[in-house]
Image: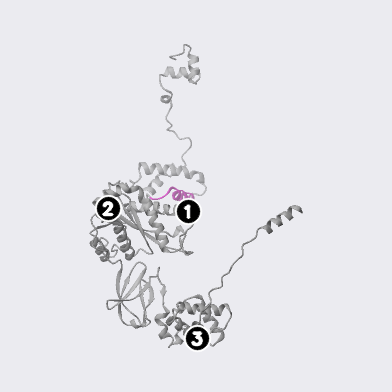
Amino acid sequence: MQTENNFGIAAMKAGMDEKTARKYQKADKLPSDLKLQHKWRTREDPFEDSWNEINMMLETNPGLEAKTIFADFQRRNPGKYSDGQLRTLQRRIKIWRVSEGPSKEIFFTQIHKPGELAQSDFTHMDKLGISIGGVLFNHLIYHFVLTYSNWETGTICFSESFESLSQGLQNALWELGGVPEKHRTDRLTTAVNKTGHPEEFTRNYQDLLDHYGIKGCKTNPCSPNENGDVEQSHYRFKKAVEQALLLRGNRDFTDRNEYEYFLRILFKQLNAGRNKRFHDEQVVLRRLPMGRIEACKREMLKVGPSSTIRIKHNVYSVDSRLIREQIQVRLYIDRLEIWYGQKKIDTLPRLRGEDKCAINYRHIIDSLIRKPGAFENYRYRNELFPTSRFRIAYDSLKKQHTPSVAVKQYLNILYLAAHGSEITVDNVLRLLINQNKEISYKQVELLSNEPVPSDTEVQIPPIDLICYDQLLQEEVLC
């Protein structure tokens, strides 16, 4: 209107009809000011009559979902409510929660200070499908994070035990090169007394904290957000492991050392972008003590007449000379050490899980060979077959002899392996099985003193693909 003398031309240039333009000019208001706010319903509210009842249900149990209430109303009023009306109820309940519902929990952003707080927790790695030597490697990672710089590291472990916590925490501190002021965990049973005194730490964990001069703290019940830094780091770390495995093109590792090296390189890469803030932390970290504390738990046990001990719901065999003697067992993250009279007697691999057994035939063979009748119904008989070839040998002996003779023959073979070389006896059994020869103690003893040829190497010649080309050419000619 400021540039055109003709009102109709001005309206066309504004993109509207001349009558509409005159209406806005007469009202002296913008189009947005003339638009009425939509406050009326376009259709009848199907829950108008029932809303008081719904309101009471929500006030009594605020956690009720709209879908649950809707299903209850459909059940009590058959045919009254159609499935398409669920969305209407969901909208009304959402408005109620915002305007009248209970207040929501607020998460308060915290200010982190250098060297003040470290958090740690265990995270399962099973879903990543990592294997060692072709065997699935089910394990956990003890994950340690500094909250100010987000510097992180981890230790492979197999349970949320005190030994795993102790070794993981100490590994992290010595790699860090200093000690933060506080260390926070969730309410781990290995660290926090659950029975009677939930506010106290266990004695072992408190001793560990005192050794390094760290103040221990724990999260409140059902409050994982209080350990939020390490919880979020779990997600980022496992995502980084997944990507590194995809880049590697293989999830199988030759041995555990190769896998540990893979993790060390990954942690180094993750920490590379945190150097500046990490340097700020290192400046204020306190000094480490003179040495580490033993990452083990000690228990005094008496060896039973079966030459076994039971610890952490698993059974282990020990040397028969220790029967009825009091021994000290030191439980580490991956092994058990047997001590007697301030001297280490034996080291056993630690079993994972519960209700398992580790019976070493060398511990009991001297007694068993004098009592062969106990073999057939021995509770841990399956543990007395060191390899599959020993089992095949025993089954073969049972076919050739009476049960009592077969047991004596097999126990003599086992005795030979215990007091000689298990590998040699196993190779002899392999030779006899492959050549379909009769297995006997005398035969095994005789061949054990002679060199045994190695496994036959199977060589597959390379496939010549020219013949396939010829077939294709013949098909074309036909």
Q: With respect to residue 117, does 423 lie above or below?
A: below
Q: Tag 3: residue type?
A: Gln
Q: Tag 1: residue type?
A: Leu
Disc 3 crowd rating (10 Å Cα; few below 14, some 14-19, many 20+) is many
Quarter in which the N terminus is drawn: top left
What is the distance, in whole Å, between disc 1 and disc 3 at their CAs?
A: 52 Å
Whether 71 is among the magenta residues is: yes
| Kind of element beneath mark 3 | helix
Find disc 3 in the rendering and name its residue: 409
Q: Residue at x 22, y 59 (%)?
A: 213
Q: Nearer the viewer, mark 2 or mark 3?
A: 3
Find disc 2 in the rendering and name its residue: 117
Q: Nearer the viewer, mark 2 or mark 1?
A: 1
Q: Is residue 237 visible?
A: yes
**Nearest the eye: 351 or 67:** 351
Q: Is residue 92 left or right of residue 118?
A: right
Q: Residue at x 53, y 85 (%)?
A: 443
Q: Residue at x 46, y 17 (%)?
A: 22
Horizontal and vertical percent position of residue 245: 46, 55
